[in-house]
Amino acid sequence: MRSNSKPNVNECRFKLSRWPVWTARREPKVTRGARLRLSARDRSLESLLEKKHPFLLVCDGVTDPRNLGAMLRSADGAGVTGVVVPRHRSARISPTVTKTAAGAIEYLTFSDVGGVPSAIDQMNKAGVLTVGLAGESKDSLYDLDLGSVPVALIVGGEEKGLATLTRKRCAAVVSIPQLGKISSLNAGVAVSIAAFEVARQRRLHVDN
C-alpha cells in the first residue's frame, strides 16, 4: 500500500550528499604474493643493459593504469627485455594494470629508477638507441634503423607527453605517420605500434 506522507527533505539531502561515498571505486591493493612475484622480477638498470641486444621500454609519467597495462601487454608480445619506470609520478603495478596486461607482468623484467632523464643518459652511454615517441615530431619512426642496435622506446604521459628533460636526453624523437584527421595516438597504441616495428626490423636483421 502506497504511503501519502511526504519525503523528509533533510533525509533526502543526507542521502544525496552521501551518494559519492557509496559509488566511489577504490583500486584494490596488490596482494602480498603479487608483490613478491614482482620484487623477484625487479632488477637494476645496469642488469637490464647487460643483456645481449637489449630492447627496453621506458615509461615517463604514464599515470593511467589501463594504459600502462596495455603497454606491458604489447611489450611482452614484441619481445621487450626490460621495462623502466620512475619511482614517482607514475602508475604503479596494481590489480587494474595486472588485469589489463593479461599476464604479461609475470614475464617482464622491471627496473625502478629515480629519474628517467638520468636513466636515458646511462642508456646512451651504454650504446642504446634511445627513441622518444612524440606525435608532433616531423621525423618518422620508420626512417630509423631499429633492427641492428640495442633500442629503448621512451613514451610520455597521456596528457603532456615527454617531459622536457626526457626529450632532450633522447637520441631521436619521432612520430608515427598518420593518414587520418586525428593528430595523435593514444599512448598505449603508440607503444604497441612502435614496439612491433622494432620487433619486425629485428626479425629482418636476424634473417639477413
Image (cartoon, rainbow, N blue to C red):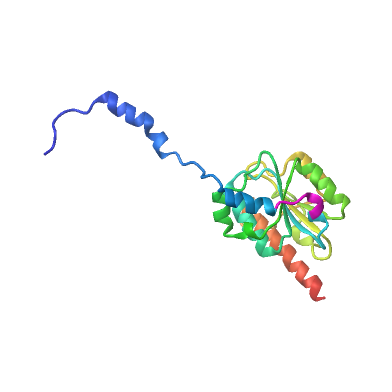
Nearer to the camera, 98 or 177: 98
Locate residue 47, reporting x and y percent. Answer: 80, 54
Locate residue 11, reporting x and y percent. Answer: 28, 27
Q: Is residue 16 left or right of residue 40?
A: left
Q: Which region is colored magenta?
A: 42-47
Regarding residue 57, the answer to whether it shows in the image is: yes
Q: Height in image: 197 above or below 21?
A: below
Nearer to the camera, 175 or 113: 113
Q: Residue furthest top?
A: 10
Regarding residue 187, the answer to whether it shows in the image is: no
Q: Residue furthest bottom?
A: 207
Name the quarter where the N terminus is drawn.
Answer: top left
Q: Is residue 122 left or right of residue 153?
A: right
Q: Is residue 201 left or right of residue 72?
A: right
Figure quadrant of residue 75: bottom right
Nearer to the camera, 110 or 134: 110
Q: Residue furthest left?
A: 1
Locate residue 201, reporting x and y percent. Answer: 76, 67
Q: Height in image: 58 above or below 206?
A: above
Name the quarter where the C terminus is drawn.
Answer: bottom right
Seen at 70% across and 59% down, the residue is 194
Q: Height in image: 200 above or below 30?
A: below
Magenta span contains residue 75:
no
Q: Height in image: 54 above or below 35?
A: below
Q: Is residue 117 left or right of residue 161?
A: right
Magenta span contains residue 46:
yes
Figure quadrant of residue 151: bottom right
Q: How many marks?
A: 0
Locate residue 136, reporting x and y percent. Answer: 71, 48
